[in-house]
Image (spheres, coloured by chain):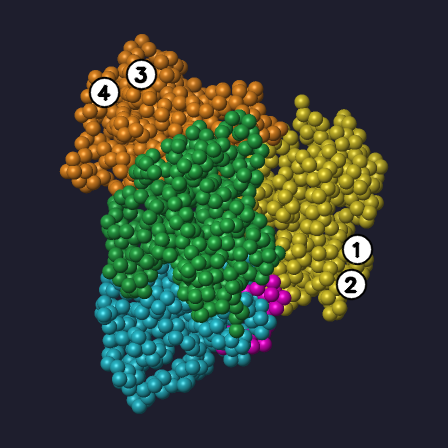
Chain colours: A green, B cyan, C orange, D yellow
Amino acid sequence: MKKAIKIVTIGGGSSYTPELIEGFIKRFEELPIKEIWLVDIEEGKEKLEIVGAMAQRMWDATPYEVKIHTTLNRQEALIDADFVTTQFRVGLLEARIKDERIPSVHGMLGQETNGAGGILKAFRTIPVIKHIIEDMKIYCPDAWLINFTNPSGIITEAVIKSFGWQKCIGLCNVPEISMMKEPEILGKKRAELTFRFAGLNHFHWHKIFDDEGTELTGKMISNINTKNNGTPANIYSAKFSLEMLKSMNLIPCGYHRYYYNAKEMLKHALEEFAEGGTRAEQMFEVESTLFALYKNPDLCTKPDQLEKRGGAYYSNAACDCISAIYNDKKLHMVVSTQNKGAIPCLDPKSIVEVSSIISASGAEPIAWGEMRSAERGWLQLMKAMEECTIQSAITGDYGMALEAFALNPLIESGEEAKAVLDELLVAHEKYLPQFRDKIIELKRMGIASKDSVVMDLMTNGR
Amino acid sequence: MKKAIKIVTIGGGSSYTPELIEGFIKRFEELPIKEIWLVDIEEGKEKLEIVGAMAQRMWDATPYEVKIHTTLNRQEALIDADFVTTQFRVGLLEARIKDERIPSVHGMLGQETNGAGGILKAFRTIPVIKHIIEDMKIYCPDAWLINFTNPSGIITEAVIKSFGWQKCIGLCNVPEISMMKEPEILGKKRAELTFRFAGLNHFHWHKIFDDEGTELTGKMISNINTKNNGTPANIYSAKFSLEMLKSMNLIPCGYHRYYYNAKEMLKHALEEFAEGGTRAEQMFEVESTLFALYKNPDLCTKPDQLEKRGGAYYSNAACDCISAIYNDKKLHMVVSTQNKGAIPCLDPKSIVEVSSIISASGAEPIAWGEMRSAERGWLQLMKAMEECTIQSAITGDYGMALEAFALNPLIESGEEAKAVLDELLVAHEKYLPQFRDKIIELKRMGIASKDSVVMDLMTNGR
Amino acid sequence: MKKAIKIVTIGGGSSYTPELIEGFIKRFEELPIKEIWLVDIEEGKEKLEIVGAMAQRMWDATPYEVKIHTTLNRQEALIDADFVTTQFRVGLLEARIKDERIPSVHGMLGQETNGAGGILKAFRTIPVIKHIIEDMKIYCPDAWLINFTNPSGIITEAVIKSFGWQKCIGLCNVPEISMMKEPEILGKKRAELTFRFAGLNHFHWHKIFDDEGTELTGKMISNINTKNNGTPANIYSAKFSLEMLKSMNLIPCGYHRYYYNAKEMLKHALEEFAEGGTRAEQMFEVESTLFALYKNPDLCTKPDQLEKRGGAYYSNAACDCISAIYNDKKLHMVVSTQNKGAIPCLDPKSIVEVSSIISASGAEPIAWGEMRSAERGWLQLMKAMEECTIQSAITGDYGMALEAFALNPLIESGEEAKAVLDELLVAHEKYLPQFRDKIIELKRMGIASKDSVVMDLMTNGR
Amino acid sequence: MKKAIKIVTIGGGSSYTPELIEGFIKRFEELPIKEIWLVDIEEGKEKLEIVGAMAQRMWDATPYEVKIHTTLNRQEALIDADFVTTQFRVGLLEARIKDERIPSVHGMLGQETNGAGGILKAFRTIPVIKHIIEDMKIYCPDAWLINFTNPSGIITEAVIKSFGWQKCIGLCNVPEISMMKEPEILGKKRAELTFRFAGLNHFHWHKIFDDEGTELTGKMISNINTKNNGTPANIYSAKFSLEMLKSMNLIPCGYHRYYYNAKEMLKHALEEFAEGGTRAEQMFEVESTLFALYKNPDLCTKPDQLEKRGGAYYSNAACDCISAIYNDKKLHMVVSTQNKGAIPCLDPKSIVEVSSIISASGAEPIAWGEMRSAERGWLQLMKAMEECTIQSAITGDYGMALEAFALNPLIESGEEAKAVLDELLVAHEKYLPQFRDKIIELKRMGIASKDSVVMDLMTNGR
């Protein structure tokens, strides 16, 4: 009989945690957990304790004996872990605010995982994930790392390809939501449909077939502008060009709007920013509300307000993935994993987000085959941009960071792009040890940290 | 509700047919067949009638209403077919005898699907399969072609890549038998194990994992020389080098002995030939016995003697594959299908034999990822040899045929190899229209058809 | 002894022709031409006659007997040609004006060979070059096609890959000018330096080495913003980021500014447009001046004013290339030719612009080797965009045209990009037979041809 | 002005050295050498002194002041070297005798650079070249390594790819001799012809064009069996199949006979062995004669008998290559260098033997483009075999050595192949530290070192 499971969640003080706990509770019969360690950092200690207590109450309200541990000592937590999940945010919500504000102020897209914001998020996260892997090699060399931390594909590539930890799967809720919403639009049950995804995290396409092998991709495309097939709530629903999609015969993901409708998306984002500030700032309020609820010692179920938090169904993805590994389920999931040739125009060693079979051996991608010219070009561009981001994040190569910015289709290249990079580096100084020398140089040149501005705004804006 | 199924079997007069019929009968509840058309050629008419009557009796003994049709008119049979299965042998058993005898006389391996014999079998079969595809494009453009005809991988590549028929799956019983035998050797149930195969038809390797993700490949290798893991009865069991297999950490297929133990295999084959003639000749007797049985109007179940015929479990593969398509099963099977990147060192358009998911959309390979140097080299060599074979089979390019011979590791290159090719071309003249000019030239040069010799032998030898 | 040479120049009525003639005159001793056929279309007849007479006078002023023929009958001209050069512009300067004006009006870059303008130029040119190749297959199957017509790389790819004419070399003066200017900047003679280029037409990088193998790339980068290394006069000299270039250690071409300094380049282009209209309109005046000069029956040498015309040294490239082929020179030139693996991240069959050896067998690229991530991504993106352009140009697939627009980094994707495409299609209706149905549909939807506006402007503006 | 050159020759005591010295003397005006260090090992000390004195006399008979140093201290010699040439043979001629005898005794091909002998030569040489590279990194980090040591391609791949020394070029006289002999056969001068080679060392093909771009490959093929185009004297001239070569339209190298005429070549080799022992044994006599001559204090020019030694024109290749680098000649040579995409079916990082341009920056391959199926398959197989050889040579992985043997087309796989490997390992024990544990195991199992037998034979046989 298999042993009971030890879960470790890095960034355990997140407001998401109750969602994750609920997911584990629902699956306890197939996924016999014995202990969950919530790990966080000093700055997040208070939240960690609130969430930890809430999580323990949730379990205590069930028939299952599961112990929640909270700790700031990651190494202690990792000892003999079976599954490590990551949902931390380096620099907390404040960092996201800067990622979104600074480009916006310059008239560029300020977005959490795409464009300049996504690159900087990777710059902050990669040094931290490197340390986590170093710890895992010592304390839990057989554990699976289930990565939620964004930009999920880039982080997963750094973990597997740069830091050599093979047992890692990157997750995202975007494909899952499509597979939940589209059957209804097509008048089918989910079980009757076969979904096949390929691409990169937040940059994938999919196809749909019914149980007679008939392709329904075109039918879904016809509905894509009128029926919500799961575009995350935070993405403005600019209309796709149906003529283009029909020529492609692929269903894009919601994030593709940034690339296929760049003008509308930027215009809308800047308007929104002018009106209400960044998405991240709006999150503050949601977060405050949630933590206020979590403090209630009588609350022992996930509050409805968490749904609004974004990232819904993340716990489905995480818990399903962990259970598929534990129970050798051969489950179809769309995850970030090593390409292995599934998308032949990318390096077999690259990380891609692709329809995979999840079993006790991890994720095995289903071979997608050759892409048409356009999608091939997009993927190769985006993967190159990701590679520059990772290399720069590891080495602190500033010229390479500029290359990542120039390649990124959501950043208009040139001097202003450089200015955005410089301000972001200075603003995130604390979390960017690899760029220390460059940041000192920038500060000497008078590049102001926008910290004070941002912090003021946050203080006042909440 | 899905419509009832029409099956067409090309080469329906084969002694295999009752096995196939039995497979369909067993699966009728999930695979509601309404009619089966057995197609054969004039020379096979008598056998066709015997087998057809036998097949009808088998159905009549069940509660199901299925009509067997026998015909020499392929086009009539193909109209609106749902599944077409091929099990024909161009030139009948006599041609196989020549494929096996002529190389053997020259001290080379005479084998049905490997070496010179396999190449010539492809030369005879490819022009015929081309016509079948032309007919299918007209009479049943939506049908699936389930190919059994050997060399199965080469024929499937010709069908999909050269003749442009995408809905084709090539089958072989070799992987199926391994998956039946190995669980017992490992002390496991089949359902507890995950098998992953990759390579080419009759040239693949596999790995095994248990339901905790632990790899059992090494354990199976340790047993490979002492316990039969499904090597076809017709292959001599030379001992693999365990040191080599352990370095590879891959389980070879039975046919790999021809490549890894070339000296022993050739020696044994020539001894066997010296004693009892070719394998093909031994088949004659089995065939006679079977048809004698089939003539018995009281027989309405598959006779036990058919098991000896070789090709056991072929019908499992065929019927399971058809049912997986019909019922959208997402079944793991090992089939010849388009690579699509699953084996990155081969062209995404090449046909490979690989662990796949069989659904209503056909076969989707599971990405295997990069091969080590040695296996990569072997596959690239064998695929090149297959490509030369196909190109030569289509164009009649004699120099290219010599290249296929030179590349083939089971043919010692040089003048004697050329002599073998020349004799085989002349011997199979009737079935090689593409080489007509060359054959005329060879005959003028005095290359004797070994027909008379072979036929004498067959007449006397039986 | 080799036979005397017949040259055919398609678009012979161009104001460039005297430059080309001068190039041939200078090289007559090594390149013994006997006749030059200048071919043009009905609309260009007047210019053709003026240029033809001028060209004959140029030869008559030399000791060489060379006959200039002018004709509107391309097929007659092509008979037994040795070299065919193309310098035609489908739709004349008026079409270029539309290519540049229409995007500019929408706030996008209006440029002859990059962005929307370059794609439309390909759309107009590819159907014409197809017909030229069809004629060449009949009338001069052994001739070399030396292509000047822009977008030179895309046209060369269509000629070689889509239309199957292998004996084609695409030329551009951009690399040639760099190799002329940079030695001086580096304080070296050209013969002391080795230049190595790789990339695509108008999108290549290069490296420089001295005669001891020391790389001077970094030194040239240090000078790139202060000394003109040959950026075409029509490209605004935005400052490159030296930090990025030093990280790359590659010297970009002048056109890279559109990609590395997108914001500044667009801003400048729109300002220029607001002030003085398009570049193409400015050309009208230059052209008028030139033809006025050419009419002078006493003029028998290339007038100085032609230098301003742009495209200087084009004739160097063309005549050097022809001579290198004729004389089997093994000359290093940078040309558009089949990749053959020289840039491993692109298809061996793709056309690239790369350092090559020009001999009697044509162009052989020097293998460049693997690119770093960023440059690999850029090239793969741009090649995909080129492929979509060519496929759309051949088939008239409108969705594919939208994909080319979306991929193109100089076009901000979205509804306005579509509007630009639509207006351009309607404006160029006469030259876009492949898009006829779509154009009719667009016109029905009220998309106005901007023809009248443009023509008015041209009439008034000159 | 460039500084005068320091040459270091590892294995300087070889009887080849006077040929190399002659080559340097002839080119002194373009290649101003100041000192040549001949390095050898203790066992070769006597020969080294003889050859060193001879070499100094050769220079002293010229007007040039060049100092010959002989030393057993490699590190001292390497200090500030400009060019290091390697011509050492690990284990001396005795080792070659074993490489050739042991397979022959088992009825397999015993050949210096192909088959089992070539693999074992690599096993012995790679650990030594590794140490040389380690020394060069310290004592002459800017030097070029010009490698003659066989198997030249494999050693060059180990140097560049495994040990990271980029400034290495591998040389062989086989292409050079073809380019010397074939012009005469074709009735042309060498300067009128363009040769293009691609493949691997001792496994390449070439094409020929005249100065009008006409291909003469087919004409050369027609003559290949009747006129000697430079097949090394030690290779038996079995007749190629002209039909196969014409289909290929490529001129094979002499060594291809082992692969295309395996049966004849093996038969002949075994006959020769039965009659006169191995090639290596025959070399003993030649060597003795040469050293007797070299001892003559009056001899100061290369004796004619050296021509018979084999390896003629090696010094041409070496001295031309060094001069082309020193003088930035852009010379066409066929060398082993990094692929960089020139042969697209092989890894850009692999070492190939290919037409290259030799300049101050080293070797740049000319892109060959895609291979046809057969040649692609051969190259991929051979490269995989080379990779297994190198990996096994570095790690001592015995299973991998068996894989190299199984892949090698000149070794019939199976138990006897293993026996040959085992005997060779034991026989070369002294030079195979990486296989020490396996060799101890083999000796315990009673695998006899054939040393005594071989040494007896050598003692008596000379």
Residue located beneath label 2 in the image: D453
Q: Which residue lies furthest to the front in this view?
A: A297
- Residue B321: give x, y in percent of width and height: 36, 70
- Residue C453: give x, y in percent of width and height: 20, 24
Gap in angstroms between the C-alphas marked 3 and 2: 90 Å
Q: In which quarter of the image is the C terminus of chain C?
A: top left
Q: Do labels 3 and 2 share a chain?
A: no
Name which residue lies at 71% across and 59% down. Answer: D435
Identify which residue, B228 or D14, lies in the foreground: B228
Q: Do labels 1 and 3 share a chain?
A: no
Residue located beneath label 1 in the image: D462
Q: Which residue lies furthest to the top in this view?
A: C298
Identify which residue, A81 or A227, lies in the foreground: A81
Classed neighbour count for the residue bearing mark 4: other residues with Cα under 10 Å, few (<14), some (14–19), many (≥20): some
Residue located beneath label 4 in the image: C458
- Element type at marker 1? loop
Residue located beneath label 3 in the image: C286
Taking the image as shown, residue D323 lies to the left or right of residue C89, namely right
Q: Is residue B277 visible?
A: yes
Q: Which chain carries label 2?
A: D
Name which residue lies at 73% across and 60% down. Answer: D436
Give the mark nearer the N terminus: 4 vs 3: 3
Is residue A133 found inside the magenta-colored segment of the image?
Answer: no
Q: Do labels 1 and 4 share a chain?
A: no
